[in-house]
Each structure stands twice: as structure tokens, then as C-alpha cells.
Image (cartoon, grey):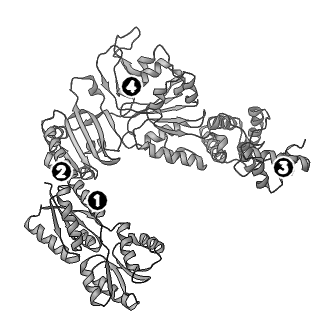
Amino acid sequence: MLAEIVLTSPNQEVTRLVEKMRKELNINLTILEASFTDAVEQVKAVLAENPDRIRVIASGGATLELMREEFPSLNLVSIHPAEYDLVLALDQAKRFGGNVGLLLADSEAIPIIENLSSALRLKVRIYTYHNWQDIEVQVEKAKKDGYQVLLGVGEKISSLVHTKGLQYIQVSAGENTLRSALQRAKDIIEAQIRETLIAKHIDTISVYAHEGIIMVNEDKIVTVFNPVAAKLFGLQEGDVVGRSLYDLSYCRCMFEIFAGLEKRLGFVHRVLNGTVIVNKIPIIDQQVPKGTLVTLREVPKNQEDVKLKKEPPAKGLLAKYCFKDIIHVNPKMSAVIAKAKKYATTDCTVLIRGESGTGKELLAQSMHNENAARRKGPFVAVNCACLDDSLFKSELFGYTEGSFTGASKGGKAGLFEMANNGTLFLDEIGKMKLEQQGNLLRVLQEKEVRRIGSDRIIPVDVRVIAASNENLEELIRENRFREDLYFRLNVLKLDLPPLRERREDIPKQALFFVKKFSEKYGKSINSLPAFILKKLSTMEWHGNSRQLEHFLERCVVLADNEADIHNVIMELLDEEFQESPSDYEEGENLPDGQISVCISTLAEMNSEIVRRVRAKAKVSNSELALKLGISRPTLTKMLNYK
């Protein structure tokens, strides 16, 4: 038999139905035919005899709320009459006339009552209550309002209503409603028994395991901390179990291991008494996080992996930029940055797509510096297009001394080792050869490398951010990029808009670049005329921000002073763009709701307006005519004008 369920019954009919279900559901059940404070007192009496006797209380209405206040640590199951039960009671009330009063403790049922009363053509006045004193007041009020028939739950209310000379119809939970409530109570107890059994198994395993085991629940409370973990962290089990991770913030290495909610396997971490390989696995039940399990395997002192502890990144492997360094006002760019900030807190791989010069590495560095667990680690940037095919493996995995002709003395760490505990940024990932892609995929999957010439496996903890200015889906169709690698990289995706789609950013960027290079070259150029900023905004910067930056550096170098800068810019613009009008000037990339036409005859301009609106709106001719407020024949005439 299961641990006990207590059900409070408002009347004899409910008691009879529940008694019938007791054997059917195989439950250890106590029925208390009482309500309100009487029911609370009876539950207290049961608990006084045996505090562990009750596991679940099934109750309804105001009695349920009293139970919730009085016994906050006990599981509660609500019993509310179903719609069918309400229909039966309302239909019975209809025989006494069209107006009835309803005593109701559950305000959530009001919309249901209103719908049912409307369907049954009854006028129902609802009187809500929270306790017995409220009921006495509401019954008196209903009588003064002229209601002769009242509906309610429980025989205790029945006695009160009858003393006032009113008719009373009892709303009672039906058999299906009661069975459902008892089944929920049974499920709760069975789940508790399973959890207790699992906890005992885990305790047994953790005591005898050779690896460190730590488990926290959904509230970050430590529930398991085995002897091996205690030794590695230099702590006592009794000082940790039952405490929140936030209370253990003085143990920084443990706090760092549990940072984030994502699954992480095989990452290396330094603890008080050694270096460990960590597996962190979230515990999910029906898509709801229930906690986190961490296992720790100590790395022997004589192994090479010991070198992979957290050390300051080598010179030149630091990320210089943060999100505040990304100059923008454009809403699209703001949305990308907001998304990137959320991605930054995870260790998932990120794929950044964008044209050349849009700031992919700037975004990658910003994400690295936003990640609390990695910002102090190295940021290693690699241009995949520049990786020599013959030396690719040695660059990626590293090599030992004497492994091949020309190998450096002492060997060399590969890119993944260099980026350990930090971020590896793979730019122009689409340029990587297919064989190289296979090697990269293996490291991403296994999270370990083996240097050329060595038989030792080195686990690595690296967050990978890849970038491409090519259409990788198209490369997959052309068999130039591995689909499995694409899906491995494309866990989180960011699309950087080109500068032509955020022209409002150009003036702000232009002023920043001019001031930057003015300071670099010792000049006093701190502003640009408004017409110059407007002119720069209309040009088609195919190289995006990088082209704009290099162009303005050239201008600052050639300008003698601030008064001369606009002349230099206008002159160099002619060279840069050879007087070719941009798509923007032709109206192709104006903001939504705007078009541009060349000045000519009125008929020609009308025809041009119609054609441009159709191209921009992408609607049918009928919809276009309606949008422009003209007839379909007039529209056709304008479109065909030559």
C-alpha cells in the first residue's frame, strides 16, 4: 500500500463515491467528512498521531485554501466540480425559476459559470467567499437581493441556507472528477517513492565511485557530494550537502563548473587539489530542468594534459573588443547584438554569417569577453583560407619534437590547445578543404586532440565561433562543404546585415574613424560637415565598414586640416566609386515607405512611381491599384507608358 492520502469530503455522496474507488485504485486513503476549519482541525489530529502519515491532501474550494495556508509543506490536489457537474446542478435549479444565486470559492470558475448560465438561459448571481464568515454574510446578502434558490458545495452550507428559509441545491464533484483527483494524488506519491529510491541508488553509487560526483537540484542546492569530490575540493561532505551553490561562492572553482545550464563533456578544470576532467549533464524531466549532475575524473600528475590548466592567455591571444565597441544605431543591428549577448553566456558553437567587412570578428571577440567563464582565457582567431593544406593537421593538433622534418624543438601546441579554456574563432570557414573539415569535425565531437607524433590524448575545453561570408547551404549542394559539420557549427546563428541595410550607422561610424585616425596621425580633425556625412551615406560600400574605415584613413592622411577634409573626401569619392550612382540613389535600397525617382515629365514620373512601388511592395496589380487609390485601367496605362 502507498503512503496515505487524506481526502476532505463535503457530503455523504462524495464519501460514498470515494469509498467505492479506494480498492479500485489500491490507495491507502483516509476520508474526513468535514469542511473549512473543521477539516483543518481533523487533519491536525491525524498529523499529531503520526507526523509522517499524510503525504497528499485532496480537497476543494475554500477548504483547499485553508489547507494550503495551514500545511504549506504537504502536497495538495484540488477537487473542483467539472462542467458536467455544474450543468446538472444548474439544470436542477432551473426548475425553481430563472434566477439563482451561486456560492463560489473558486473565482477561476466564474467564466465557465457565465457561459453555462447563458446557455441554460438562467440568471446566475455569484457570491464569492474565502471562509465560513464570508458564507454567512453572502447568504444573508443573497436573501436581501431576493434570491430564493442558492447553489453551493457541502452539507454544512446546506444547513445555514435552510435556516434562512431558502432552497439549497448542492453542487457535488462527480465520479470522474473524484477519480481524476485521486489518481493525481497517487501519481504524486509514486513519483516521490521513485525519487527516494533513485536518491538512495545515487548515494550508494557516489560513496563507492572512483570519480567525484556532485549533484544539485533545480534550486542550486547540493544534494550529492561524494568523498572523492570532497577530497578534490578540500571540503567536508557535511559542509556542502544541503547548501546552495551561492552560499559556496568562496569555492570559486565549483561555482565556475556549474555556471550555465548547457551540457558540457570532457572539459578540463583546475580544482584545489589537482586538475580534473569534468562532465556536466543537466537533469531534465518532461522538458523541465530538475538539476545538474557533475562527474570529476582526476588527471594523473605525470600526464601531459596537466599542462592544460587555466593560465593567463599568451600575448596576442586576447580579445580587445566588447559589445560597446560596435558602433550602430540601426534596429536590425541592435537585435543581432541582443541575440549575441544571450548566446555569449552559453558554450554552444556559433555560426556568424555576413559579408566581408561587416564585423564578424568584432562580434566574436565581444561574445568571448561577455562570457564570464572564458573572458580570462585566450581568444585564438584563425583565417581558414590561409591554412596550408600540407600543414593543416600540425596547425590544428600541434606536434611533438622530431615528429617530422622541420618540427620545432620541444614541439608546438595546436590551435585547440592554444585556445583551451577560451574561444577559437574560425573565420572564412567555407574556404576549408573537405579533408580539413573532417579533421575539424572530429575534434568538435570528441573534444580532445592528439599531437602529431604523440599517443597521448589531450582533452580540450574550447568554445568555437565560426564565420563565413559565403552561402554554406549552397556549398553543401555543390559538395564543397560537409553537411554534418554545418549542423555541428550552426547550433546558434547570427546574421550580420551589410552596411547598405543600415545606412543610418554610416555617419556615426564615419565620425568615429575620422577621430581615430586623426589621433593616430597627429591631426586635429574632429568633425565632418553634414553634407559629407549625407554623401557618405548614399554611397555603396561593398566592402562594408572595413572599406569605409580604410577610405577615411586615406582621407585623413591626405587632409591638411579639418577645413580641408571635405575637399579630400569628395575628390577621393570620385576615385573610389568612379562617379557610379549607387543603388541607394536609384531608390533600390531606401528605407521602407520611401522611393526615389528622377525628375522628368509628370507622366514619366507617375509611371516611374508606379513601377517602383510595385517592385518594393511586391503585390498584385489589383492590390497595387487599391493601394494607390487609382483604377485598374489607369494603373495599366501608367505601367505601359513609354
Secondary structure under tag 1 reads: helix
Callout 3 amino acid: Leu
Spatial CA distance of label 1 from label 2 is 20 Å
Picture quarter containing residue 172?
bottom left
Q: Locate residue 122 relative to residue 537 in the image: left or right.
A: left
In the drawing, what numbered circle is on residue 635? 3
Callout 2 amino acid: Ile
Secondary structure under tag 2 reads: helix
In the drawing, what numbered circle is on residue 443? 4
Residue nearest the observer in this picture, 577 or 294: 294
Question: Given this view, does label 1 or label 2 mark the residue nearer the observer?
Answer: 1
Residue at image position (30%, 39%) is: 281
Spatial CA distance of label 4 from label 1 is 52 Å
Question: Does residue 445 sit above or below 36 in this rendering?
Answer: above
Spatial CA distance of label 4 from label 2 is 42 Å
Residue 181 x, y percent position in the rendering: 27, 61
Q: Quadrant of the C terminus?
A: top right
Residue 350 x, y percent position in the rendering: 47, 36
Residue nearest the observer in this picture, 97 or 547: 97
First in sequence: mark 3 vs mark 4: 4
Question: Given this view, does label 3 or label 4 mark the residue nearer the observer?
Answer: 3
